[in-house]
Amino acid sequence: MAKVLVVAEIKQGVLKSSTAELLSKAKAIGAEAAVVAIGSNIEGLVPELVKAGSDTQYIADDAGLELFSAGPYAACVVDAARQFGADLILFGFSESSKAAAPRVAAQLDAACASEITEVAADNGAFQVVRPAITNKVVQKVKVNTDKLVAVVRAGAFEADESIGGTENVVKLDIPAPDLKAVIKELVSDASGEIDLADADVVVSVGRGARNEEGIALVKELADDLNAGFGSSRAMVDAGFMPHNKQVGQTGKIVAPSLYIAVGISGAIQHLAGMSGSKVVLAINKDPEAPIFNIADYGIVGDLFEVVPILKEELKKVRS
Amino acid sequence: MKILTTVKKVVDVELNIHVKDGAIVEDGLQYVINAWDENAVETTVQLKEQTGAETTLVSIGGGDNTDIIRRCYAMGIERGIHIEDPALDKADSFIYARVLQKVFEQGDYDLVITGKQAQDTDNGQTGIILAEYLGLPCVSNVIGVEVIDDKHLKVSRAGDAGTEIVEVELPAVITVDVSINEPRLPQMRGLMMAKKKKIEVMDLAALGTSAEEIGCAAPKSEVIEFMESEKRSGGRKFEGDPAEVTAQVVELLASEAKVI
Ligand SMILES: Cc1cc2nc3c(=O)[nH]c(=O)nc-3n(C[C@H](O)[C@H](O)[C@H](O)COP(=O)(O)OP(=O)(O)OC[C@H]3O[C@@H](n4cnc5c(N)ncnc54)[C@H](O)[C@@H]3O)c2cc1C
Ligand SMILES: Nc1ncnc2c1ncn2[C@@H]1O[C@H](COP(=O)(O)O)[C@@H](O)[C@H]1O
């Protein structure tokens, strides 16, 4: 039976939904499933890790692991993978995963697949499915090694609440810090806000909003809807929005029930991050904007006029 | 400082790409420099302007890629190596990283700058694997670089919790994101001069290695089939009085789409 090690995704002490989704997938392909959790002050998460479906919990808990550093993080995963004898190592989709997964693969002499949407074990040989070429195509990839490290695209798998697991905690040795790449400072952006990846509704702002004033207007719409607040790259590069709010090929992948694109043209690199959304609403003053080619509902108009009306109308229906 | 910059020639993603019988239809495709690699080149040239760094680029495969190498010359890169060998036809990121390792070991480089990701593979792996093979520190997804001294860089990296400011010891590998800079447009004069510059074309033997040593026959993974991606089709577009159409759309979001 294949053995799958899932790397727990923990943000600000909270276990993210990807962990249960990946563990469910592991069990669905008939594998024995373990989890590795890395961070500071995370031992309290063990019951949740068990409930999410793991049968062994490898824990690396140390104040030195509070800030993400790819070297030590990868070392913990490699250690857990060796102890468990993992054939498949699954990471959730994040910048940290993208930085650590290739290191883990190189150290284990495993294959490495990014942004997979499906994985199957066929007679012990893994096959994955993943988008490529800026989401323009999908590829089926055959893995030739017996071990695979994969980063799973956000929203690819669903959690099966019924699986459950058993508690079997293994404490990992804490790796030495990376003295050759030292994090001096973390300039954190707007923590307490709703995490884009988890949000059921995402409102994103584009260059059409022009400036801080425009952004504030769109942000109010997001707040009214209790939505995640995202951005196109144009507004990130202009310095108006923080990097971790960027939706798209080099940013976050989101798949909410409702995605509202405000003043965003719909470049393929932006679409690559949000085209999995269930329903898309676009507001753009240019009737030819490419975003309308993929939006379920499109309002052609000036966002400075439309957004205030939209807020009022939404209030009416929601009350 | 000696910088090695990696550049791949990739399919132009802005054009339509079709799939037939599990393969990409070659007809009508165009090939360009990978967007992230253009940022890597710009980063390199800026470091050259600041510190007088020596600049070398390496590109593996891509057929005739004199056009993209010349473009990089015109942007300010001094030396270009093109590695072309039929044994690399099925290369994955690990094989490319092995080849890059050979190039690195021959050049006494202080810094490798790769793109974060190649637009054809969308892997985002090669630079990080190269650093593992070389046993060097690596910072990925870099959005800013400052030189501290000839042994240290201060880089910013877009991470999950925010922007990480990392002090990295050289030699090192960094992979850069498109947000790091706006690549310069090569000037006519630069392009003319670039035509006269030599490109060092080598196969694996000329690089002092072999298909066996690199492991070309055993890629860790291979694409066995391409498929069309699911296309979202556009729905309805509402034009007219903003108050009217907005009210109409909100009503549909509630009653038809049932998302609010
Ligand atoms: C390698 C690479 C990776 C990239 N990765 C990403 C990524 O991850 N995410 C991303 O978003 N982009 C990414 N991009 C950039 C992408 O190509 C686009 O440049 C970017 O998405 C454009 O942002 P925008 O839609 O806000 O701006 P624009 O394209 O300038 O569009 C602005 C839109 O606003 C509309 N508008 C203007 N005024 C108003 C108004 N008053 N009311 C209503 N509408 C108005 C305009 O009609 C226009 O359609 C990447 C590019 C490359 C090359
Ligand atoms: N064939 C190649 N030649 C030169 N550089 C490459 C090649 N393949 C990958 N790279 C570099 O590695 C980066 C990441 O590639 P990938 O891992 O395929 O996403 C690219 O942006 C390039 O800088």
Image (cartoon, grey):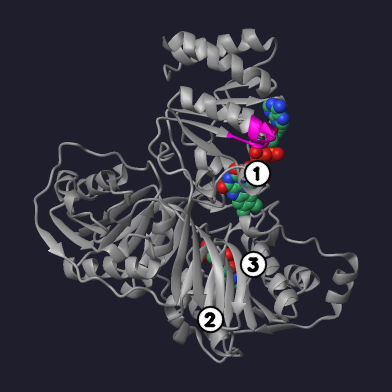
Nearer the observer, A99 or A289: A99
Disc marking residue B40:
3
Residue in the image at 82% along x and 64% along y: B186
Q: Is residue A194 visible?
A: yes
Query: Looking at the rendering, in which quadrant would you find the N terminus of chain A?
Result: bottom left
How dense is the environment of label 2, judged by Cα within 10 Å: few (below 14), some, or many (20 and up)?
many
Asked whether the beta carbons under mark 1 and mark 3 sit within 8 Å of each other, the answer is: no
Q: CA distance from mark 1 to mark 3?
A: 19 Å
**Residue at (62, 11) in percent of width and height:** B245
Chain under disc 2: B
Q: Magenta segment, which residues?
A: A205-213
Chain letter of disc 3? B
Residue B170, numbered label: 2
Q: Does residue A169 appear left or right of residue B128 in this picture?
A: left
Under mark 1, the amino acid is: Ala
Kind of residue at disc 2: Leu
Callout 3: 10 Å neighbours few (<14), some, many (20+)? many
> Which SS class for mark 3?
helix
What is the C-alpha distance between the residues marked 2 and 3?
17 Å
Q: Amino acid at mark 3?
A: Ala
Quick check: A263 above or below A250?
above
Image quadrant holding the C terminus of chain A, namely: top left
